Image (tube, helix red, strand yellow):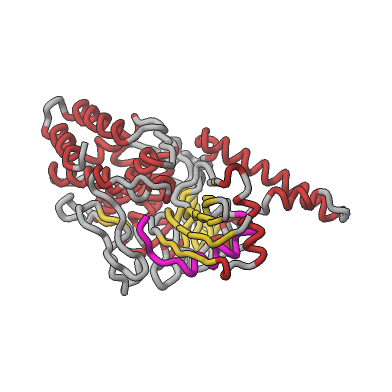
């Protein structure tokens, strides 16, 4: 699977703010790529995880652009896999306000 | 900004744990197997608690107001609740976040007790557990199914989240929702969950300040913004944006009419976005009826919260508030008419 880039969106939390950014292929490290490939390859390319019974958690969505289409990954802040934590942290820092 | 900076707060992917469980190193193998068991137990516990919230409630010793405040000392949420720093009846702390969490939990308890004869979030006197100083520069507060947790804010966009009584009331009301209708946290039912948290968060503040519906600011989270912010609040019940073209916040995405309802997948189907529609309807009911918003509009909404189910949607809400207004104040009453007109004004 070839990854061309990712579109990131952060939403939820009690603040309800929607922020986002994009990252090109050149900005991804080798470990970013292998983690994204692994998660994007799962269950039809859509991975979603959230803690039940928990409210106002921040939600992260990663739209992974690949040579076979866009795969959507979704996590909340407590279910974020460790191998995506550094990437999401960089995306959170780069993100700016966007329309939902 | 991310709570997950703390690596222990993030869950190791199962495939790595599986690989480690087959390690030739006995100690690595033992730790991996323990981790797998702990993760599975945690997932199972969370799933059970989501279905049976009463199991998560920590009963208070005397089944009455009982507050516990913990200090997270900037650690991640896997360390909740943290170190106990103030319990019911103990003197003030030197830490303002501890005192705010304690005092505002008390105001919220008194609000539900005096106005609705409700004994804590579960109506069975559960302890109100709050943890402050979660993470570093953490821009959020949440209800995790068992307790409240508050970040300190990054100091650039937000300050500490205990500072707003309406935010504390919002988080605690998520607990009341959990123990009543338990509205599913996605799409319209999730937007209603957020709506009730905002409504009672605002009413708790109005009640504490003894404000009429006409005098109230109808804002959520005004006190958690840094003083230099161009935003007035996180949300407003009025038909106007709470912020516009703010460099950090952008433009308030909340619709105030059904025709503008958000239909995308962000924010669990727009739970913090589409709550703007019922929020504005509530504002219209309260300001039409006048006086204190908690006496009539609040009563209708509280009884409605008790009557809804986990899958209720906007239409169920419209029907139930009309039915409740009629039952409480009479068919054809001014209260019932105000409810009908308010929902019509937002597109129903």
Number of dots carrying numbers: 0
Q: Is residue A90 magenta?
A: yes
User: What residue is at 42 percent from the left and 33 percent from the top?
Assistant: B310
User: What residue is at 61 percent from the left and 58 percent from the top?
Assistant: A2
Residue A3: x %, y % from top left? 59, 59
**Relative depth, front residue between B114 and B272:** B272
Residue B176: x %, y % from top left? 40, 40
Residue B243, by quadrant, is bottom left
Residue B107: x %, y % from top left? 35, 51
User: What residue is at 31 percent from the left and 71 percent from the top?
Assistant: B229
The answer to whether residue B280 is left or right of residue B229 is: left
Classified by dominant secondary structure, the portion drawn in magenta counts as helix
Taking B331 as reference, is A89 above or below it? below
Taking A20 as reference, is B143 above or below it? above
**Relative depth, front residue between B15 and B90:** B15
Quadrant (top left/top right/bottom left/bottom right) for the C terminus of chain B? top left
Question: Magenta span covers which residues?
Answer: A81-100
């Amino acid at each position: 699977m070839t990854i061309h880039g990712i579109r990131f969106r952060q939403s939820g939390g009690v603040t309800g703010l929607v922020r986002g950014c994009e990252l090109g292929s050149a900005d991804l490290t080798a470990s970013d790529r292998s983690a994204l490939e692994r998660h994007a390859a799962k269950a039809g390319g859509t991975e979603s995880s959230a803690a039940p019974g928990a409210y106002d958690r921040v939600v992260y969505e990663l739209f992974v652009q690949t040579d076979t289409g866009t795969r959507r990954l979704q996590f909340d802040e407590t279910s974020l896999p460790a191998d995506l934590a550094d990437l999401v942290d960089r995306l959170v820092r780069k993100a700016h306000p966007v329309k939902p | 900004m991310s709570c997950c900076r703390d690596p222990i707060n993030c869950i190791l992917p199962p495939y790595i744990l599986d690989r480690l469980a087959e390690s030739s190193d006995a100690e690595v193998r033992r730790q991996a197997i323990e981790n797998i068991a702990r993760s599975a137990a945690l997932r199972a516990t969370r799933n059970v608690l989501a279905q049976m919230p009463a199991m998560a409630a920590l009963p208070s010793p005397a089944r009455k107001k009982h507050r516990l405040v913990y200090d997270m000392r900037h650690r991640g949420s896997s360390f909740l609740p943290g170190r106990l720093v103030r319990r019911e009846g103990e003197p003030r702390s030197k830490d303002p976040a501890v005192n705010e969490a304690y005092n505002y939990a008390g105001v919220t308890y008194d609000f539900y007790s005096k106005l609705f004869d409700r004994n804590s979030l579960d109506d069975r006197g559960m302890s109100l557990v709050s943890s402050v100083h979660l993470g570093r520069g953490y821009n959020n507060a949440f209800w995790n199914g068992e307790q409240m947790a508050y970040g300190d804010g990054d100091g650039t966009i937000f300050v500490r989240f205990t500072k707003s009584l309406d935010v504390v009331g919002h988080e605690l009301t998520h607990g009341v929702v959990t123990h009543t209708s338990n509205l599913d946290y996605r799409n319209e039912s999730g937007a209603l969950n957020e709506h009730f948290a905002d409504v009672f968060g605002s009413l708790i503040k109005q009640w504490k300040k003894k404000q009429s519906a006409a005098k109230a600011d109808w804002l959520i989270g005004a006190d958690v913004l840094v003083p230099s912010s161009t935003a007035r609040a996180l949300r407003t019940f009025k038909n106007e944006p709470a912020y516009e073209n703010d460099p950090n916040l952008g433009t308030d995405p909340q619709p105030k009419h059904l025709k503008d309802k958000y239909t995308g997948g962000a924010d669990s189907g727009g739970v913090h976005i589409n709550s703007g529609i019922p929020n504005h309807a509530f504002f219209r009911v309260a300001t039409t009826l006048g006086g204190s918003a908690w006496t009539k509009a609040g009563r209708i909404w509280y009884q409605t919260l008790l009557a809804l189910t986990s899958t209720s949607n906007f239409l169920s809400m419209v029907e139930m508030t009309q039915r409740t207004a009629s039952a409480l104040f009479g068919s054809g009453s001014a209260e019932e008419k105000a409810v009908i007109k308010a929902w019509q004004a937002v597109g129903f």
